[in-house]
Amino acid sequence: MSRVQGIRDRIEDARVLLKASRCDGAFVLALVAVAGLSRIRYPGTTPQRVYFDKLLDYHPDQHANTKDRRAKVDESRKMKDGQAFKCMILDLISDVIVPNPQPGRFAPRENIRIPFGKSRILTNIEELFYKAFRNSFIHEGRLTDDAYLTAPTIEGEVLRLNDPTGIPVRWIPNLLAALAKAPELG
């Protein structure tokens, strides 16, 4: 089986679990598909500077910190798996949050940060997906007490997430749809 077919299979498996209301399992498989696709789009030969350049583009209010971190990177270093995963999340996130924005309405394109954890520190969306979701499922077999899946509450143009950080269940099918549209999957 090819890598591409493996990713397609994970997407389909996740859809089956979602139809059976097994949201955690569907989310795990969606995250596995993100990880697999990230290494097709950003192979092991991708320079690490690509990660920092993407952060500079996506988080304009964090330029000083990101530029400092990028300046310390050895130009010969390659992108790590976690960095590739985060780049992939940034590539997909607007379709995950608002898959079909109407003209003139909110369309997330940059700098999405969510209060996270007991201290409610603003956390970049890609870090949240990597640390709170991917790492929790992979290393603990569950979401931590700091994050869970919830039905979204929309007040005006603001998406309210519960405390601890709740991620809307509707993001799972949106993530699966965004993955399925990836050009690498043909």
Image: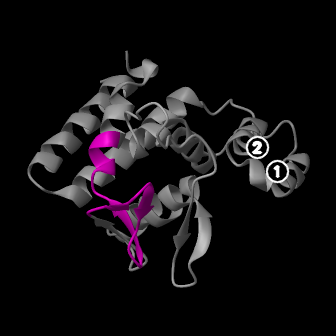
Residue 123 as seen in the image, left or right of residue 97:
right
Q: Is residue 88 above or below residue 112?
A: above
Residue 56 is tagged as: 2
Residue 55 as seen in the image, left or right of residue 121:
right
Residue 77 is tagged as: none
Q: Is residue 171 above or below residue 99?
A: below
The C terminus lies in quadrant: top left
Q: Residue at x 58, y 40 (%)?
A: 109
Q: What is the crowding at mark 1: few (fewer than 14 residues within 10 Å), some, or many (at least 20)?
A: some
Image coords of residue 170 (percent x, y): 28, 51
Image coords of residue 71 (percent x, y): 91, 47
Location of residue 150 by image quarter: bottom left
Residue 113 as seen in the image, left or right of residue 57:
left
Q: Residue at x 54, y 55 (%)?
A: 125
**Most foreground residue, 90 or 98:** 98
Q: Which residues are magenta?
A: 151-174
Q: Are marks 1 and 2 in contact (CB under 8 Å)?
A: yes
Find disc 1 in the rendering and name its residue.
63
Work out which residue is located at the far top of the displayed protein and give it. Answer: 186
Q: CA distance from mark 1 to mark 2?
A: 6 Å
Q: Earlier in the sequence, mark 1 or mark 2?
A: 2
| Kind of residue sitting beneath label 2 | Leu
Work out which residue is located at the far left of the displayed protein and give it. Answer: 20
